[in-house]
Amino acid sequence: MFELIKNVNINFLGKRKIAGVFSGVIIVAGLLSLVIHGGPHYSIDFEGGTEIQVLFHETTAVESVREALSEIGYGDAAIREFGNVNEYLIHVKKATRSEEQVNIIRDALASIHGGENYEIRRLETVGPKIGKELRGDMISAVLIAMIGIVIYISIRFQFMYAIGALVALTHDVLITLGLFSLLNLEISLSVLAAFLFIVGYSLNDTIVVFDRVRENAKVKRHDAFEAVLNMSLNQTLNRTVITSLTTLTVVGILLFFGGEVIKPFAFALTVGLIVGTYSSIFVASPVVLIWDENQKKKQHG
């Protein structure tokens, strides 16, 4: 393998307190944002309603769009700029199930400039019941994945490694979810897919480190466990960095050139890759060390 990083001897575990404070601040900020906003900003996929992507061919202010929708009873619609100039994404919470209701919205948009001087680029409708079911399925999918991970790592390694991996995965999801809340980005089905990818990617990186820890622990059985962990992290650092940079290159292209629709998905992947790499070093391994130290204290206490 190409070696980008050679012969390093970094005391990663010695910096675990600083890393803990750093992660704690970001997680708390994200959780506070979620509380203030009343939870994540769900897209139409989970919340239900009608989403319309519309491009006006004349200069159109957000206020004009809101005023037109207010006249037909949709004053609470979420309206934000999207893509091109004079292009907006309108999210109406009430699901417009009939063609007649959709036509009412069309007429309201047409009234802004006195004619159909606009283009509807996308129109999606999801019923509130379906949205609620999808939201429940999303939470279940993430929880089931994490439970399966704990069982798998407990069998392949030891229970303390499973705890380390679980804390790291929870850390990654909370930070990504918190950043979405802080930046007021929507959680959609594609973002859910990105969250599950984050769980898988972070787990893979963590298992590579744990596998090396297990090998070194057999050879260096008389060394302190903290030294074995640090040695393993340094030995896998080159592989971790190269894999992350390679993946980030592709995801970065999606983020900057993939268009508005795919941007939340690409952003979630980007954050997940960075945080997942960080947590494998500064979260999973310190948790394993703390667990091991506590177990030894109980045995000698």
Image: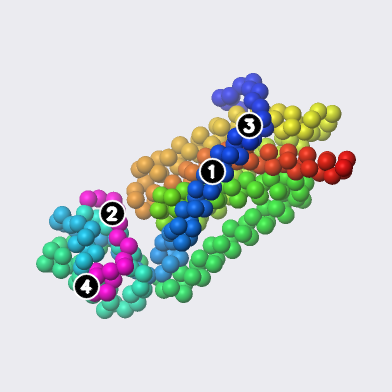
- Residue 129 spot, x, y in % from top left: 46, 74
Can you tell which of label 2 and label 1 is closer to the viewer? 1
Question: Callout 1: 10 Å neighbours few (<14), some, many (20+)?
Answer: few
Mark 4 highlights which residue? 71
Mark 3 highlights which residue? 15
Can you tell which of label 2 and label 3 is closer to the viewer? 3
Residue 81 disc label: 2
What residue is drawn where x is 37% and y is 46%? Answer: 258
Question: Which sits earlier in the primary sequence, circle 1 or circle 4?
Answer: 1
Q: CA distance from mark 2 to mark 1?
A: 31 Å
Rendered view: 191 above or below 75? above
Q: CA distance from mark 2 to mark 4?
A: 21 Å
Can you tell which of label 2 and label 4 is closer to the viewer? 4
Rendered view: 182 above or below 124? above
Q: Which residues are magenta?
A: 69-85
What residue is drawn where x is 61% and y is 39%? Answer: 20
Q: CA distance from mark 2 to mark 3?
A: 42 Å
Q: CA distance from mark 3 to mark 4?
A: 58 Å
Question: Which sits earlier in the primary sequence, circle 2 or circle 1?
Answer: 1
Q: CA distance from mark 1 to mark 3?
A: 16 Å
Where is residue 292, by image quadrant? top right
